[in-house]
Image (spheres, rainbow, N blue to C red):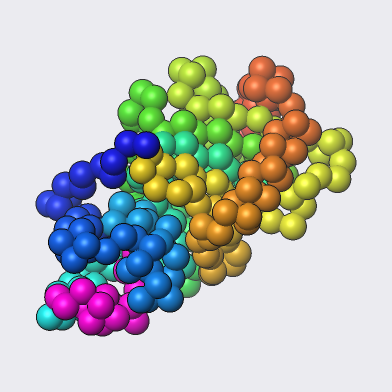
Amino acid sequence: MPGPKDLDPSSSPRALLGAELRHVRERKGLSQEALGLKLFVSGTFIGQLEAGTRRLRPDMAPLLDEALGTDGFFERNCRASNKSRYPEHFAEAAEAEAQATEIKEYAPLLIPGLLQTAGYARAVCRAHQPTAPDDRIEQLVTARMERARLLTDPTDPLLWVVLDEAALRRVTGGREVMAEALQHIIGLVRRSRIIVQVLPFDGGAHAAMQGAIKLMDFEDAPPLVYFEGVGTGRLEDDPATVRYQRGTYDLLSACALSPQKSLALLETMAQDYAHEEHS
């Protein structure tokens, strides 16, 4: 098994904390599992902290300092590492997403953030915060567009999305915005940058009717699954939970249209939206 990937401590406060945690733990001669026992967490969780895929919680930082004898280093630096431009419930997931090598997502109600255009994102953010100042909405849109820069890399991460037909039929921001949003996805598919399947209405009942799924795999950390609701979200690393959700995603993919048929449907819908707007 390859050793852990070296993090660049200058890349982010979280990378600094992860690199320092690994350095101090190894200097103390502790395994990830042994340190986890001292903190009542799993060794897997310690590995995720070191890899930068999980954030250090403020309540855990003093315990780390006590266990490792680091004289308040982690407590002092925890606040800076947790600063984020994203909503609190999503910040950890967004930062993990940026380090993932593979992302599989099922979107039942809206186009996922990584695939949104600015116009679509603006409509979603405004609907969620109808009384927010315009500059706050633009900050949220900018953050969402910066997340999507992950896809400027020609190959990494692998992004495989199952879109529910409901997400494509809901006219979000108007028909022109929807036409642009679907054309954006079509462009990514045609450039072989992403894999998209559509789960059609006539597919009937399916395994994930109760909500969205986002699975993330990493080069040097265990996989995660992210669950999101209205104004809330959580990351799970429990192997049984991740395995179950992976099986659910596989069932969804089997029920969805093939990538080729999905592309044809997306193109037809984009043309319909554009024609209706023109009319």
Nearest the eye: 27 or 87: 27
Q: Is residue 177 magenta?
A: no
Q: Is residue 150 left or right of residue 240?
A: left
Determine whether 15 is above or below 170 in the image.
Answer: below
Query: Which percent across, then down, holds residue 54?
Result: 37, 60
Determine whether 193 is above or below 225 in the image.
Answer: above
Determine whether 221 is above or below 43 in the image.
Answer: above
Q: Is residue 121 left or right of residue 18?
A: right
Determine whether 192 is above or below 136 in the image.
Answer: above
- The magenta region covers 55-70
Query: Which percent across, then down, holds residue 129?
Result: 49, 68
Query: Which percent across, then down, holds residue 153?
Result: 33, 28
Q: Is residue 200 left or right of residue 65?
A: right
Q: Is residue 64 magenta?
A: yes
Q: Residue 277, located in which quarter of the rendered image?
A: top right
Q: At 82% from the left edge and 39% from the top edge, which residue is drawn? A: 201
Whether residue 123 is visible to the viewer of this picture, yes or no, is no
Label tally:
0
Whether residue 224 is visible to the viewer of this picture, yes or no, is yes
Q: At 15% from the left edge and 61% from the top edge, which residue is drawn? A: 27
Q: Residue 204, located in which quarter of the rendered image?
A: top right
Q: Is residue 49 left or right of residue 234?
A: left
Q: At 78% from the left edge and 47% from the top edge, which residue is drawn? A: 207
Query: Which percent across, then down, holds residue 46?
Result: 35, 62
